[in-house]
Image (cartoon, helix red, strand yellow):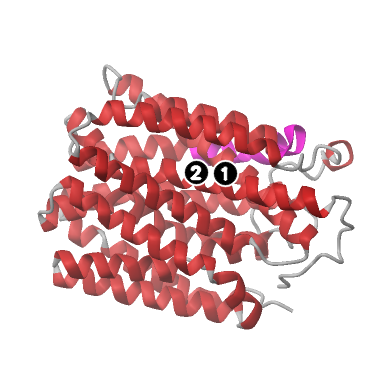
Amino acid sequence: MSSSPASVIPNPHSAKALSSARRATRAQFAALGTLAGTWGAHVPSVKLHYVLGEAMLSTVLLAAAVGAVASLFAAGRIVARLGARKTAMVAACVMCAVLGVVLMLPNLAVLLPLMMLFGAAMSVFDVAINTEGSELETLSGRAIMSNLHGMFSVGGMVGAGVASVLLRAGIAPALQLALVCAAVAAFAVVSARGMLDTHVAQAADASEKAHFAWPRGLLLVLGLLIFAGMTAEGVMYDWSVLYLKQDIGMPQAQAALGYATFAAAMALARFGGDALRARYSERALLGAGAALSATAMAVVLLSANAWIALVGFALVGAGLAPVAPILFNAATRVPGVSRAAAIASVTSIGYSGFMVGPPLIGGIAQNSSLTAALGVVVLAAVMLALGARYVPDKA
């Protein structure tokens, strides 16, 4: 897989426009990460507010998963018709509006459908910004996907860190979510103005190829590997804070730092990832990173020690860092489908891990323990390490 495919598609954009688009797209990844970090830090708040057990909490997470996966069948068409910029603006407003009121709803009957909408908006937003990122990498002739996903991790660290500070200050969780989501929505809409109108000019002749592409062949292999990686990553987003609070005994304000540590390490690894992709085999990077994540998480669960958990979470984050940048970009090189359709295709499987995996953890935890359930992270990382050999290496 080449990380410098600029010769494939002529570049009609000026260097200034590409630079502006890269900054805007980095901001979008940061916005998405901030929402993910904020949500992850407040999963215990949702559990407490609605008086949920692990099984019912997993139902809430499953509702988001259903919306996320279902929306991917239309995500390619939406991006092709509206362009990545407009799609990102609309999806950002929807997901921020829903998350902003998630602790103000009267009951689960209202919460569950709104969580479906939240998941749908988040996945469409994700496809839009990954489509933009892939096109920018092609047009600029240099690897940038790891850097973009690094901004997602930075956002996750910021979201979890801000939640920790506000919890320490005694700010009500419902007010926290409302304020943070309003700020993120404004930031995402303003910064999106610098993005390219990806696919808009091509909509007429690309409409036939922009439909959802059922994963098969190489797309299926890539999708399954993304599934393994996002299962591990999604479990860390949704359950790491609760694990530190419930099984290790840390206060929630301190437990939120566990997620921030995970996200910070992932961000640092991703910012160096583009240089590593240019120098080393991508399948080797995937395999080594996954092996590191599996080993670190196994040590965390066996030790049940707070400090070891914080260090271990950092190593898990660093090990999982190469997964999304490498595999999403690989999907866009599969012939016969548009960028958005290819990304939506593998994301349909990947989001099943990213958002269906964590609810499954709840079911296991309900019948065993959360510590035992988090062994899924180890299993997913091992599967990814073994499957990395099937990823086409860069030319």
Residue 22 lies, with reference to residue 388, above or below; the image says above
Name the residue nearer the viewer: 385 or 34. 34
Name the residue nearer the viewer: 358 or 20. 20
Residue beneath disc 1: 28
Tag 2 and tag 1, C-beta contact below 8 Å = yes
- Image coordinates of residue 241 in percent, x first then y, are 24, 51
Please name the residue shown 49% across and 43% down the image: 32
Residue 290 lies, with reference to residue 34, above or below; the image says below
Whether residue 101 appears in this view of the structure is yes
Name the residue nearer the viewer: 45 or 59. 45
- For the C terminus, give its image quadrant: bottom right
| Cα–Cα gap, marks 2 and 1 | 6 Å
- For the N terminus, give its image quadrant: bottom right
Please name the residue shown 39% across and 60% down the image: 264
Q: Which stretch is magenta?
A: 67-84
Any magenta on residue 381? Answer: no
Relative to residue 24, is residue 357 drawn left or right? left
Residue 286 lies, with reference to residue 26, above or below; the image says below
- Image coordinates of residue 357 in percent, x first then y, are 38, 52
Callout 1: helix, strand or loop? helix
Amino acid type of the residue tagged 1 in the rendering: Gln
Residue beneath disc 2: 32
Please name the residue shown 22% across and 31% down the image: 171
Relative to residue 54, is residue 23 drawn left or right? right
Callout 2: helix, strand or loop? helix
